[in-house]
Amino acid sequence: MISLSHLFDQDTPSTETEPPEAGSLAAEGNKVLRLVKTVGQAMADGRLASGQRLPSIRTMAAEHGVSRDTVQRAYDKLVAGGKIQSRRGAGFFVAATTPPPARDRTPPAVDLEAFQLIYSDLPPDRVPGSGLLHHDDGSTEELARVLKGAATLGRRLGRYGDPAGYLPLREELQNKLRMDGVDAPIDSIITAPGCIAGLTLFVRSFVRYRTPVLIEDPCSFAHLAVLLAQGAEIYRIPREADGPNLEVLRLMCERHRPKMFLLSSMLQNPTGTSISLHKARKLLEIAAEFDMTLVDDASYADLAPVTDGRPAVPLILLDQLEHVIHVGGFSQTLSPEMGVGYIVAGERFMELLRLFRPVQGLANMLIPERVVYRFLHDGLYRRRCERIRSRLLRHGVTLRHLLASTPVKPAQPTATGGTFLWANLGEGVDSSSVAKRMLAKGYLTAPGSHFLLPRTGQPFMRFNVTTTTPAAIEALIACI
């Protein structure tokens, strides 16, 4: 039951004037008006939502120390004003409000500049802000060998394949999930042309114009672009070292009743942090309370260190497909050219996903899907991820050593693995201006303006641990 008592004291008589005598008509009238104002304020700030049941007359009287008759008169005034409705035998409810007419406004523009971090043709040592993991020669040669074997299937091409994705690959994904402790039916797994394509498929299936949706702050610019393209009403939840800020999350859920929350539980882009076990459980409780879907971008989950100091697990392991949509992909672990992602969702989501998947694009993924299948089936993928995790940890430690004698301070005090390091360039430093000066020197960086609100004045910058060189750090310090 929602409490309204903390607003009551805002309307008590001023000590500068003599309060009405207790029991007088004026005193009772003041109590009624204060109660009306208290309920109205709770409705205005979102603590009482449309259709929500108000406390009973008995409860309200006890909570505010007034008579039941005072509460009845206050409720009568609210009914007369159209603020609440009386339902015989059920109580009083906040009246449904007519939404204001949609305003003509230009939707926020997608930050296309940020996408150059993905599509840049600069050499790896010139892109410290790259969004792609730079693989070593051994990993590249391994992929080429598997790809060559899959290419021999060319004589059997000429069709689009299974609309849910290559069945043997989906079976391998099912086995992979089972090894992680998730029992997912094969029909709950579909493939997509990459992780972002999987996120786009879900958003197109379930988000309509002005649907309230939550994202993290900072967040991947791709997340924001996907939601903007669908016309979603976007609200941001601050990302902390151990996951989203749950107090702000609950407030936004109470005010806006969002349909979904798009986030990354493991190695979040750009901060590189993972959600703690305690916060993951609390997050799932809030999702269940408000019937909100958590769409978990697990692009980097397979690269999370096995031991990370704090317990960190994918949300799907705790939820088992009740309120979590798990979206994964192989562009980071294998190569962007593979273009294979997947969605794991409960049956209540699958009907629309199966419907929208073919109309999103008839891309033929037969060869990439078979490449991923071979990596999983032959045990190559597990060993590859182990090598990448070790390499990322080494690169992360090296980068921290490079920054130790500079004004640039990593947001996380110790190395946690992952592709990215999120750092503060210093008080009063505008990372966007630094990025422009770096570009003039031939280096492409990732300023905080690509990931945070507001878009200006941010001192933060994201670094790719596999592409940031000592020369790049030297040029950066000269630009600050």
Image (cartoon, rainbow, N blue to C red):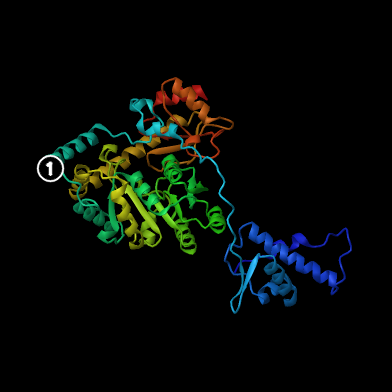
Amino acid bearing label 1: Leu
Farthest residue toward the right? 18
Q: Quadrant of residue 149?
A: top left
Element at badge 1? helix
The residue positioned 48% from the left and 47% from the top of the image is 216
Residue 125 % position (x, y): 35, 26
Bin the neighbour count of mark 1 within 10 Å (Cα to Cα): few under 14, some 14-19, many 20 and up.
Answer: few
Establish if 35 lies above or below 215: below
The residue positioned 22% from the left and 49% from the top of the image is 376
Farthest residue toward the top? 441
Residue 453 % position (x, y): 54, 40
Viewer can see residue 241: no
Residue behind mark 1: 153
Name the quarter where the N terminus is drawn.
bottom right
Left or right? Give the position of 352 relative to 277: left
272 or 183, which lies in front? 183
Farthest residue toward the bottom? 89
The residue positioned 17% from the left and 40% from the top of the image is 146
Farthest residue toward the left? 155
Q: Quadrant of residue 114?
A: top left
Establish if 165 lies above or below 425: below
